[in-house]
Image (tube, helix red, strand yellow):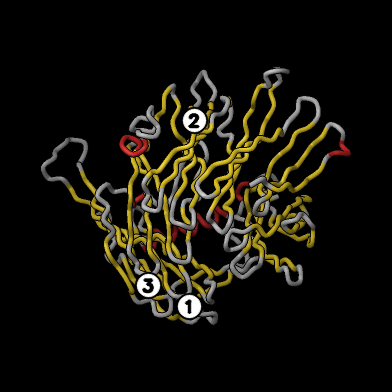
Amino acid sequence: MNALFDEKGNLFGYISIYDYGKSGAKTKKFEYVIMDKNLNPFANKEFEGDITAGDYYGYINFDGRIILKPNSLDYSLVEKKDMFSPSSMLIDLKDNTVTRKVYYDFDHGKFNEILQHDTWKENRKEAKMERKEAGFNYKSYVTEVKEGGFLVSEYEDHGSYTKNNRMMRFNEEKRELWRYDYNTNGSKKQAQTINYLAQDGDYYYGLLRERIIVKDDDYYDLQHERTSKKDVHYLLVLDMKTGKEVYKKEIPDPEEVLDRIMYFPTYSYGLLDNDKIFDDKIVVVGRVESGIFYRGVCRLLVDKKTFKTDLKILTYKEDFKPFVPKIKANGHVGNGYELDPRDIFFLKDGSVGLLFEKYKAATQYTAQKTTDMIYVRADSNFNITGVNLFEKETSRWQNSDYLFSQNLNNDSDLVFFYRDYQKDDETKDRNWNLFINTYIKGKFKQEMVPISSKENFLIIPYVAKEGYILLNEYNKKAKYNQIRLERLNY
C-alpha cells in the first residue's frame, strides 16, 4: 500500500496492490483497491500485469489519472534470457478502467508506440550492433506535457561522452513545434548538459552546465596525465511555446557545488526529495562534497518572475559550528557518529528546515547505530537561525528511526514523526514510542504516543491527511485490530 498525493502534495487517498500470481505465459493477475483520505474504499479492479512485475507504486498523474509504476522486479517466473522490463498501468477513476500505459519511442523524427518490451538480452544485442555500425548509440526520451503534447530529448551516446543533443516539443498530433540544439560539438574534452528544474505552460527552467577538460602541460608522470575540469553553470529559461531562449545567465559557483546539486544522497537513507516548486520560486538543496565526506549543504533559489538566482553554502566547519559545537568539518559529531540527513522541509516564506540523525556505520565487529535527531533552521536567505536537539535512545541494527513528515497550513508549518525504543523506569520493559513534532509559527511542540506493548499491541504509524496520522494496530486480541485516523494536537 502507498499514499496518493495530488500535484500540490496534498493527500488524495491510498492504493493497495494484491498479487494473485501467474495468469499466462507473460502475465500475472493483480488487483488494486483505492481508498479516499478517510479510509473509505471507493474503487477496485483486477487486471493483468507483466509477469516480471514484482509490485507497483501508485501515483497521480497531472491529468488526474493514477499510474501504477513497477516498483520491483520478479525474476522467479521467467528465465534469465527472457527477462524484460514490465509496463506501467493506467487507472482512469472516471469509469474505473485499467489499461497499459501507452509510451512512445522517438526514432530519428518518428514516434513509435511501444507495444511490447524487448528482452534485456535483445536490447543489449541491438545496442552493440548499432554501436559497431554507427560508432555511437542513438538515444531518445519522450515525456508528456501537462499543457498538451510531448517533450522529446535525443542525443548520440559515444560511451565516454555525448554529442548533438536536442530538445524538441510536439503537439498532441505529434507535429513539431520547436527544437533547441546544444552540445553540438560534444567530446571528451568539452560537453554541455541540461538538468531539468521545472516547467509550466510558459517556461522551461533548466540548469545548463558547460564543462571543459584541461590538460596540465606542466605536470609529467610516467603513468598518468593530470587533467582538471572547469564547469560553468547557467540558468537556462526557454519559452515553452517557441523554444526560444528567454534567459541564459551564469550562476556564480566559486566552490563548484552546482555539479551535484540535482540529487541529495545520504549515508544510510537513500536519496532525499531535495526540491520544491512554488508559484513564485524554485528551491533546490544539495550536499557539498569533499572527497568521500560531506562538508556542508547548499541552496539554489530561482525567482520565477525575474529569473534571478541565489546560491548559498553552509559548511559544517563555519556555519554549523556555533550551533553544534562538537561538529567537525566532515560532519562527524563525536564517538564515531556523523550527521546523516533524513528530510528537507521547504516552507512558503522561503525558509528551509534540515533534519539530521546521528548515525554510526557498521564495522566488521559492530552494528550500525543511530541516536539523537537534530533539526537545523535556516531563514529565507539560507542563514542558520537555530538548532533543535531531540534526544533519542541508541538504536542498534537500525539505519534510522525517522518515519515521515507533512507540511501544514499551506506550507507555512510542518510536522515530522520518529520512533524511539525506550526503557520504562518502573517496569524496566522496553517499548516503542512515537514522537510527534509540530513546528507552528516558529515554535516546536512535541507529543509522545506509545506504539508497542510487550504483551498487548504493536502500532505501525503511516502518513495521513493534513493534521492527522494513520495508525495500524495489531492487538493480542484480534477483535481489537484496526486501522484508524487520529487528529494531531496542534
Give x and y (percent) for residue 183: 31, 65
How far is disc 1 from disc 2 in space, using C-alphas? 48 Å
How crowded is the residue under tag 2: few (<14 C-alpha within 10 Å), some, or many (20+)?
many
Which is nearer the N-term, disc 3 or disc 2? 3
Q: Amino acid at mark 3?
A: Leu
In screen coordinates, is 166 left or right of 341? left
In screen coordinates, is 84 left or right of 186? right
Q: Is there a contact, CB below 8 Å, between mark 3 and mark 2?
A: no
Q: Residue at the spot x=47%, y=66% of the render?
A: 279
Q: Amino acid at mark 1?
A: Phe
Give x and y (percent) for residue 199: 46, 68
In screen coordinates, is 298 left or right of 171? left
Q: Which residue is mark 3?
A: 238
Give x and y (percent) for residue 323: 39, 34
Which is nearer the N-term, disc 1 or disc 3? 1
Q: Residue at the spot x=77%, y=46% of the render?
A: 484
Q: Is there a contact, CB below 8 Å, between mark 1 and mark 2?
A: no
Q: Which residue is mark 1?
A: 170
